[in-house]
Amino acid sequence: MVISADAARHGWDTVLWFRRPAQVWEEALPLGTGRLGAMAFGGVDRELLQLNDDRLWTGGPMRPPQGDPAVVERARRLALAGDAMGADALLRTVQGPDTARYLPLADLWLDVRLAGWDRTAAAYRRRLDLSTGVQTVSYRVGGVGVQREVVCHPGRHVLAWRVQAEVGSAVQVTVGLENALGGNGFGVGAVAGLSGVAGMAYAVATVVERDGPDAVTVYVATEAGYRGPDTEPERDPAECARLATTRAEDARRLGWSRLRAEAVAAHRELFDRVRLDLGQAPDLPTDERIARRDPALAALLFHFGRYLLITSSRPGTLPANLQGIWNPHVEPPWRGNYTLNINLPMNYWPAEITGLPECHQPLLEFVERLAGHGEQVAKALYAAPGWTAHHNSDPWCLATPVGEGTGDPAWANWPMAGAWLCLHLWQHFEFGGDLDWLRERAWPVLRGAAEFCAAWLIEHEGRLTTAPSTSPENHYLDAAGNPAAVGVGATMDLALTWELFRCLAAAAKALGLTGDEVVARADALLGRLPAPPVGARGQLLEWAAELPDAEPGHRHVSHLVGLYPGQRIDPLRTPSLAAAARQALLERGDAGTGWSLAWKTALWARLGDRDRAAELLAQFLADATVASGQGGVYRNLFCAHPPFQIDGNFGITAAIAEMLVQSHPGELRLLPALPRTWPRGSVLGLRAPGGVTVDLAWDNGELTTVVVHDLRSPVAVRYRDHLASLGPGGHQVLDGRLTALS
């Protein structure tokens, strides 16, 4: 099975290109090493590279949490008695400081001059090849052809920018650095400073290399003072400048050709694992394609999401935050932090299914570190064992409720982040099967989160529930008609608890652990957890009781987490619950932007409703501009929440994968939500639990070929009414009726 000849020849489903330089940041093109990020504007006489380093934040190590568990206990009693406002007031008193802010690093200006040029450029093209990670700008000035390339080397965390004029044309480059945070210069081509009066040191270093009269290469390295969540940051700018300059000089000695080749090879090793072909894409600039919304644009969006994860999350880096790694603001939206009640988990939804488990590692390591701080918080605030975390965090692994007494408990006091994040650890094992990693790294974290959830459950009126309980970031109307956040038994609480206990039991079985007291307690509680509640209209409820919505079209769909990305609700195994989830999704409505649309797209895909999934995907691809303030995508395909948030890009990539291949316990479902607008296509390399990789091809909306690779254990494969049972094997080929071909 091969990709169509047209797609293989043209590759427009892996290329963003434009006929003019970027006019605003949201039109620039992102590059990154996982740590060093750059937004390239592509100006003719002056190139702007807006630089970030994923380690440059405000703040410092988390202070020991202060709290009185008796306060939360009183809030619990008030919530159980129906006094939402009283519980709300008490919960605000246990809120701690807000998170750190993610900061911009510097603007790098590159002035380009050709001998005798007239400033008028012809045949301009700006291009980002997602498959190589190379951004190219080409044009002609005064009859002379000029080509510029930018590439980021993920191993060295160095950016290299090169301009090459036609032979015989002299080119000159002047380098300038502007520092958004203030600071001091250290040596030629370096800028350094502190992110505040007593903050974190940082630096940018540039080294210029001339290769004859017609070519110049600029090597760029960054440094920031972050040294881990429990270590005070480096505060000497001169030291950061030294480190950055050393890396830039090392890159110069390596040379442009070798550095470019290594960077492209490292990028392709990840990117080439998956390829989606939805038919021939038009050879049009990306902004024109967005305006037209051609059917194949979804493939470009899918590949762009994978590209963004590769370039913003690499082994050894911090997790991708709300901005990925790309942020021009000293005061970024929502502090650019790690928002744990949906946004950070969504960032990593595509990691395993689209073949990027290495890119998952920064999140998995972050969760391990967060668990250590979360143990302190569980004890100080809740007198509970295990560990917990709340709505927001940062590289210092903040685990306390934020808000400093003014935060709405609807978001600030939600204690279920540990449960949700642990599902990523289990998913990584399910897909990869590394028992040593599960035993040594993941198991203690899973066990600790389950220990907290078991302690957090209480029995009320003969049922297990949680209190005080919130459903991020929504409100209901209390008896007086006032918006209230604090209640009892939010569906999300119990859904995440169910998922975590299920994963813990599976992990214990995989490791051969018997007699563990936490596993035994979680297993006993799992069987007693109430079924998801259903209301009078047949809708899945957000709280234990049927309460009126303060905002019926609220952007969060937290109560549907058991449908996606969870496993409790399934159209085939639990059809009545799936019907209730569908009704809840209909009542919530299609309106939304950014990550909300991405989540709804994935939910409709999980329900097998290809038409609704396609409608939401089309809405996600609406043409957005900064001036409009509307949702959709910007001209560079960044998700417009608005403003830009990267979680929507990652979430929609996972949703597209969900339309094509779904993993359910013991079963793979093929093309469960294939849109009518994709009548012919193929996808190579999607992954599923058990180490399996799946290739598919379809024509006239019908499955034609399936190839299953590296299946470690038996699995059922379903396509519509066809069902096949596959045993372990290296390479199995089926036709559209799931009959073996070889």
Image: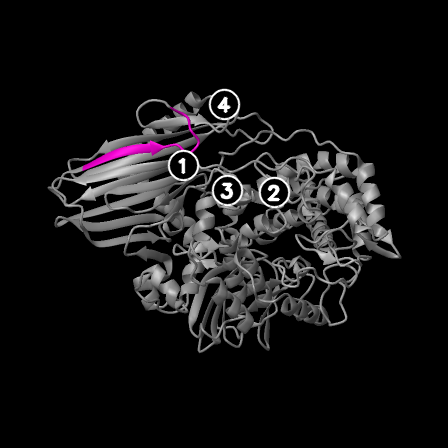
Labelled disc at residue 437:
2
Up-down relation of residue 360 to residue 2 (above or below):
above
What is the number of callouts on the image?
Answer: 4
Q: Cα distance, mark 4 to mark 3?
A: 22 Å
Judged left or right of residue 721, residue 35 is left
Q: Are marks 4 and 1 in contact (CB under 8 Å)?
A: no
Q: Which one is closest to the eye, mark 4 or mark 1?
A: 4
Say few, some or many: other residues with alpha carbon within 10 Å of mark 1 (under 14 / 14 to 19 / 20 or more): many
Tell me the quarter of the picture where residue 50 sits.
top left
Judged left or right of residue 57, residue 682 is left
Labelled disc at residue 612:
none
Label 2's element? helix
First in sequence: mark 3 or mark 1? 1
User: Residue 464's spot in the image, x, y percent?
Assistant: 83, 54
Q: Which one is closest to the eye, mark 4 or mark 3?
A: 3
Say few, some or many: other residues with alpha carbon within 10 Å of mark 3 (under 14 / 14 to 19 / 20 or more): some
Q: How is the image coloured?
A: one colour
Range drawn in magenta: 172-184
First in sequence: mark 1 or mark 2? 1
Which residue is tagged 1?
Answer: 157
Q: Are marks 4 and 3 in contact (CB under 8 Å)?
A: no
Q: Nearer the viewer, residue 176 or 647?
A: 176
Q: Is residue 173 magenta?
A: yes
First in sequence: mark 4 or mark 1? 1
Q: Cα distance, mark 1 to mark 2?
A: 27 Å
Q: Is residue 451 visible?
A: no
Say few, some or many: other residues with alpha carbon within 10 Å of mark 2 (under 14 / 14 to 19 / 20 or more): some
Labelled disc at residue 235:
4
